[in-house]
Image: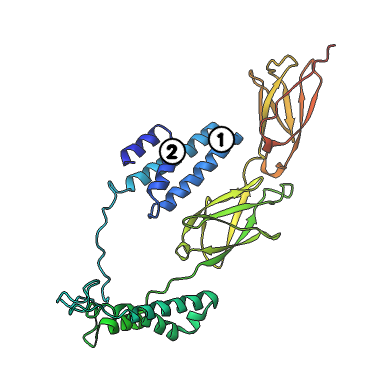
């Protein structure tokens, strides 16, 4: 898909399709983490839209921010995919070359019509198989016996090179020169590959910051961290700590996307700064307990205006469409409230309201029989 097509999807408000295309297009690129983060933000936007706990203006602002961020990612993408090509060796790498005489290449034989002996080749296979088996069944053996493991690996490489006499030339600073099987042995034994950093474990501690003592406690948390190619999940202990294992070393010091699920709370930020060995994640109320709203009707189902509604000392009067909307101060927020509704000629109504469940609609009964 081209950049123009992506812009068209975004312009048509088909954000979910645009995100899906970008996730596929930016796989294994430096833009992938940005797109995953935007995907997480869009999922949160849809959840808030379904729950109806944010005003239309706030929801529109969220969508607009996601739209502009998607356009910014699209603008950074290259106009066309790279065509590939050769990769230059790093500066200071050993130099290899052929003999220049056409001898020694695979299938060329020894030059006199005789095929080289297969014994060195099979020896190299056996040496490599032994090294692999020991490493698999004796964890840590290669690290504890570094010289021996490098010797076996170098002999295995030399056995293969022995079937290609004169094919390899090896030189270090005009001091050490070797060719053929010996060049392969020296290369493997003396030139150490760059060490790969091992995956690590990150301890995440939750720090709830409720509005007041009446606010419900944090529990049943589900948290996932994006580990470049997959979501990693961990179970939290009773004291709010979880160990996320096998995280990639390249995540250290970076903001990574999160997926969160818990009643009444949300992370203070939509990403997590990875800083081993442990980080603290601030968690704040998600706003689901700050609003009590709904519609009141009469027994015939007709909207009822002018009804006085009271919750926690806060008052509102239904409008022409029968709607009421009350905002609960932070220090009074809790899981449920007691709602009172009164109007002339009708019996007072009293209902228990659970704001996290959404709108509370009910009808009032007339005093007349």
- Residue 358: image location, x then y, percent: 66, 33
Give the quadrant of the N terminus. Answer: top left
- Residue 154: image location, x then y, percent: 36, 81
Q: Residues within 10 Å of mark 1 (few under 14, many from 20)?
A: some
Kindly report the distance in space between the C-alpha atoms of the residues bearing marks 1 and 2. Answer: 18 Å
Q: Which residue is mark 2?
A: 17
User: Please, what secondary structure does the residue beneath circle 2 have?
Assistant: helix
Residue visible at 16% across and 74% down? Answer: 102
- The quarter of the picture where residue 165 lies is bottom left
| Residue 146, above or below 330 | below
Residue at the outermost bottom position: 175
Residue visible at 49% across and 39% down? Answer: 62
| Residue 341, above or below 101 | above
Q: Which residue is mark 1?
A: 49
Dot placed on the residue nearer the N-terminal end, 1 or 2: 2
| Residue 230, above or below 325 | below
- The quarter of the picture where residue 264 lies is top right
- Residue 213: image location, x then y, percent: 73, 50
Q: Is 352 placed left or right of 156 in the picture?
A: right
Q: Residues within 10 Å of mark 2 (few under 14, many from 20)?
A: few
Give the quadrant of the C terminus. Answer: top right
Residue at the outermost front position: 113
Q: Is 87 placed left or right of 289 in the picture?
A: left
Residue at the outermost left position: 101
Which is nearer the eye, 152 or 248? 152
Which is nearer the eye, 301 or 211? 301
Comparing labels 1 and 2, the label whose residue is closer to the camera: 2
- Residue 215: image location, x then y, percent: 71, 47
């Amino acid at each position: 898909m081209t950049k123009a097509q992506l812009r068209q999807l975004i312009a048509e408000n088909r954000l979910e399709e645009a995100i899906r295309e970008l996730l596929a297009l930016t796989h294994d690129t430096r833009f992938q983490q940005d797109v995953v983060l935007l995907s997480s933000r869009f999922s949160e936007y849809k959840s808030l839209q379904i729950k109806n706990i944010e005003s239309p203006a706030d929801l529109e602002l969220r969508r607009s921010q996601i739209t502009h961020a998607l356009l910014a990612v699209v603008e950074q993408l290259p106009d066309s995919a790279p065509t590939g090509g050769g990769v230059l060796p790093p500066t200071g790498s050993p130099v290899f070359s052929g003999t220049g005489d056409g001898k020694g290449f695979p299938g060329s034989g020894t030059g006199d019509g005789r095929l080289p002996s297969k014994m060195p080749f099979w020896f190299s296979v056996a040496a490599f198989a032994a090294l692999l088996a020991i490493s698999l069944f004796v964890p840590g053996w290669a690290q504890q016996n570094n010289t021996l493991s490098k010797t076996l690996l170098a002999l295995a490489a030399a056995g293969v090179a022995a079937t290609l006499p004169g094919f390899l030339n090896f030189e270090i600073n005009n001091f050490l020169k070797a060719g053929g099987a010996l060049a392969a042995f020296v290369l493997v034994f003396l030139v150490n590959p760059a060490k790969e950093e091992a995956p690590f474990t990150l301890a995440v501690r939750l720090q709830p910051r409720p509005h007041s003592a009446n606010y419900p406690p944090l529990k049943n948390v589900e948290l996932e961290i994006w580990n470049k190619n997959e979501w990693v999940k961990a179970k939290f202990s009773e004291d709010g700590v979880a160990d996320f294992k096998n995280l990639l070393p390249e995540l250290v010091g970076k903001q990574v996307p999160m997926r969160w699920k818990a009643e009444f709370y949300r992370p203070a930020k939509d990403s997590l700064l990875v800083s081993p060995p442990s980080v603290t994640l601030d968690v704040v109320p998600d706003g689901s307990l700050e609003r009590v709203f709904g519609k009141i009707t009469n027994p015939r189902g007709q909207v009822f205006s002018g009804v006085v509604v009271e919750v926690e000392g806060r008052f509102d009067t239904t409008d022409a469409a029968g709607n009421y909307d009350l905002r609960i101060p932070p220090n009074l927020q809790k899981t449920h409230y007691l709602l009172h509704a009164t109007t002339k000629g009708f019996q007072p109504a009293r209902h228990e309201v659970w704001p996290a469940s959404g709108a509370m609609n009910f009808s009032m009964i007339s005093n007349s029989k």
